[in-house]
Image: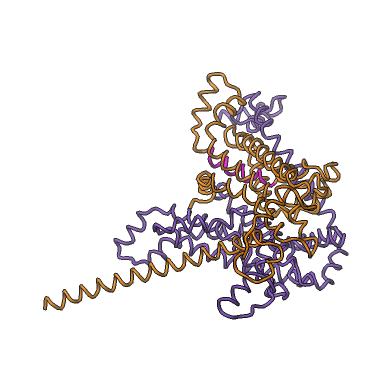
Chain colours: A purple, B orange
């Protein structure tokens, strides 16, 4: 009661209550010089964000703002092939990998004397830089001298196909290379997730008479579902932007038939010297990227910036 | 009567033991498949590097006459693609260390101000970081290339450092805010009562207590910068300014390159990150669980 009268009284005055309150909430908890410090500490990141994120994004939006670019883009048959490739790459690559990673996390959580050794070797693809690894895979898959076909011939007497000379085997090679490289990382993440499940829950389930399968469906699955979902979304964004595996394994060939959007944009911009078309190609992924990003940001914020 | 029960018991015991062994065997087979799957491309790299150039094409599964000649060529810069190899190695190292330190500095300051000083509107900073984290770097490459030209940084290592710091900092901010929650606020308050200013609290209390997270994120940023190819390739074009990644990819420019030299370069380039990774695996694993998991 008294506070409302006070507010009403001072409403017209030079130090109006609303103004004071706003200033208070702006400073909330910080006193004078502390606020200056806080702003100063935030400044470096704000500057980086402004100069190297906001400006490039704005510049990119401006570069790709001409509708004629999109007409040109959609008239290019290579672009349509690329869209199909990208969808297959992201859809298959991510989901197969996450499923494998989930299963393998179950394999690695059972401690055996040798599983530690396997884990150490299994992580090697992830620890190896992308560029040498994919160069090696490119040679590994070479139809004439590649080790894979040598192996197939020596072991089974089969003449393997020329993997990188065909759209579908080429695309499959890229997807496999991507899975090879990133499977260990997601396995480790999901393994850590499994280890965070309290052991008591399994014990309680066992007391209630649950077998292995029911423990899996009623304890592991519900507790891991959210993490699995977030990981899948995050990896979809990563896969959408993955440049290295396509660029170095198949090189986008034969005849640009295995390009994905990330490599096609660069190809347009720097090989054919059509930077605006390149930006347009990348921006045409936005209808897929924006929902993913919004969903992800909501999910990540809910878990307070995990991952 | 009792004979049949004991018989049955023996049977079921045998059955369980058999089942146990077959499961173990299947697991062992799976482990074997995993090891082969993981190591084949790595083995392929070594095999090509250890072969003489002519032997690469003879279809054998191991080097007939293994030789370290390719490694000698790389180390002594005895091939024209590799003329500035150690200089470029130094460039890669410089970029990695610079990105690592900048990421730690900028990221820890930002997380300190958001998490410990309750800066109003600090959520905007966190959201900005979150947004940067989920934008694929390759999608920003073309405008970033233009921007660097506008800033006059083209073909200068600083441009790569700036771009990669931009992409490494968001992860740093998450990990730091996450880890910072485990440091009691009372420490800050008691320091404040003793008359410490925010910088002193940050430098003397926050940073030392954050050491494990700093190591994890520093390693992450170092590896990210060392392993990056696309931005190095776009922003650096002279042999003087190149990093090893760009120099390595140059081998692909011609069809007649000496592949054994290429693979030897690739191995030398890959060894430092692998060594760092395995060396700091414990911290990295801690970083992963810090960032990755909460039901």
Is residue B253 shown above or below A173?
above
Specify the principal SS of the magenta part. helix
Outermost residue, front side: B65
Q: Residue at x 54, y 28 (%)?
A: B205
Quarter of image, res B216 = top right
Is residue A46 shown above or below A246?
above
Residue A9, position as x, y percentages in the image: 65, 27
Residue A241, position as x, y percentages in the image: 70, 58
Foreground residue, A235 or B185? A235
Count of numbered marks: 0
Quarter occupied by the N terminus of chain A: top right
Residue B150, position as x, y percentages in the image: 86, 44
Quarter of image, res A203 = bottom left
Q: Is residue A29 left or right of residue A117?
A: right
Quarter of image, res B170 = top right
Q: Residue at x 57, y 58 (%)?
A: A231
Outermost residue, left side: B1
Q: Please report the bounds of the magenta region as a residue range.
A: B167-180
Foreground residue, B181 or B229? B229
Q: Is residue A222 left or right of residue B130?
A: left
């Amino acid at each position: 009661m008294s506070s409302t009268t006070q507010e009403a009284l001072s409403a017209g005055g030079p130090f109006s209550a609303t103004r004071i309150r706003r200033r208070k909430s702006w400073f909330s908890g910080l006193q004078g010089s502390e606020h200056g410090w806080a702003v100063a500490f935030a400044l470096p990141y704000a500057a980086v964000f402004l100069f190297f994120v906001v400006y490039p994004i704005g510049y990119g939006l401006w570069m790709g703002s001409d509708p004629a670019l999109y007409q040109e883009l959609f008239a290019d048959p290579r672009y349509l092939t690329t869209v199909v490739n990208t969808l297959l790459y992201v859809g298959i690559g991510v989901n197969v990998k996450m499923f494998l990673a989930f299963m393998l996390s179950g394999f690695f959580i059972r401690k055996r004397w040798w599983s530690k050794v396997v884990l150490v070797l299994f992580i090697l693809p992830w620890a190896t830089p992308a560029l040498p690894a994919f160069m090696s895979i490119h040679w590994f898959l070479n139809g004439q001298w590649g080790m894979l076909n040598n192996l197939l011939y020596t072991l089974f007497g089969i003449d393997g196909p020329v993997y990188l000379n065909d759209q579908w085997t080429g695309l499959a090679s890229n997807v496999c290379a991507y899975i090879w490289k990133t499977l260990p990382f997601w396995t480790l993440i999901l393994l850590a997730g499994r280890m965070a499940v309290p052991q008591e829950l399994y014990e309680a389930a066992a007391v209630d008479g649950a077998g292995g399968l029911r423990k899996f469906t009623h304890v592991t699955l519900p507790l891991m579902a959210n993490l699995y979902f977030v990981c899948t979304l995050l990896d979809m964004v990563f896969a959408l932007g993955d440049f290295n595996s396509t660029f170095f394994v198949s090189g986008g060939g034969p005849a640009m038939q295995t390009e994905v959007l990330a490599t096609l944009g660069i190809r347009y911009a720097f090989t054919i010297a059509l930077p605006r078309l390149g930006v347009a190609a990348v921006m045409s992924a936005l209808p897929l990227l924006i929902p993913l990003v919004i969903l992800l940001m909501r999910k990540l914020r809910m878990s307070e910036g995990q991952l | 009567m009792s004979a049949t029960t004991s018989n049955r018991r023996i049977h079921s015991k045998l059955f369980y033991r058999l089942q146990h062994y077959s499961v173990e065997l299947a697991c062992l087979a799976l482990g074997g498949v995993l090891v082969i799957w993981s190591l084949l491309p790595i083995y392929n790299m070594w095999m090509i590097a250890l072969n003489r150039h002519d032997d690469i094409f003879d279809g054998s599964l191991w080097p007939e006459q293994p030789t370290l000649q390719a490694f000698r060529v790389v180390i002594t810069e005895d091939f024209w693609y590799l003329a500035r190899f150690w200089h470029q190695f130094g460039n890669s190292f410089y970029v990695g260390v610079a990105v690592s330190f900048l990421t730690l500095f900028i990221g820890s300051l930002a997380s300190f101000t958001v998490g410990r000083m309750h800066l109003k509107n600090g959520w905007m900073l966190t959201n900005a970081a979150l947004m940067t984290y989920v934008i694929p770097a390759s999608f920003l490459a073309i405008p970033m290339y233009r921007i660097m030209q506008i800033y006059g940084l083209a073909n200068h290592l600083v441009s790569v450092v700036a771009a990669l710091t931009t992409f490494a900092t968001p992860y740093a901010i998450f990990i730091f805010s996450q880890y910072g929650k485990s440091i009691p606020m009372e420490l800050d308050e008691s320091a404040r009562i003793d008359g410490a200013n925010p910088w002193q609290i940050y430098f003397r209390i926050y940073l030392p207590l954050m050491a494990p997270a700093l190591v994890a994120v520093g390693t992450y940023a170092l590896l990210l910068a060392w392993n990056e190819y696309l931005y190095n390739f776009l922003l650096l074009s002279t042999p003087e300014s190149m990093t090893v990644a760009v120099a390595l990819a140059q081998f692909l420019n011609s069809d007649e390159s000496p592949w054994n030299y290429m693979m030897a370069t690739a191995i030398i380039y890959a060894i430092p990150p692998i060594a760092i990774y395995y060396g700091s695996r414990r911290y990295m694993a801690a970083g992963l669980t810090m960032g990755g998991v909460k039901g």
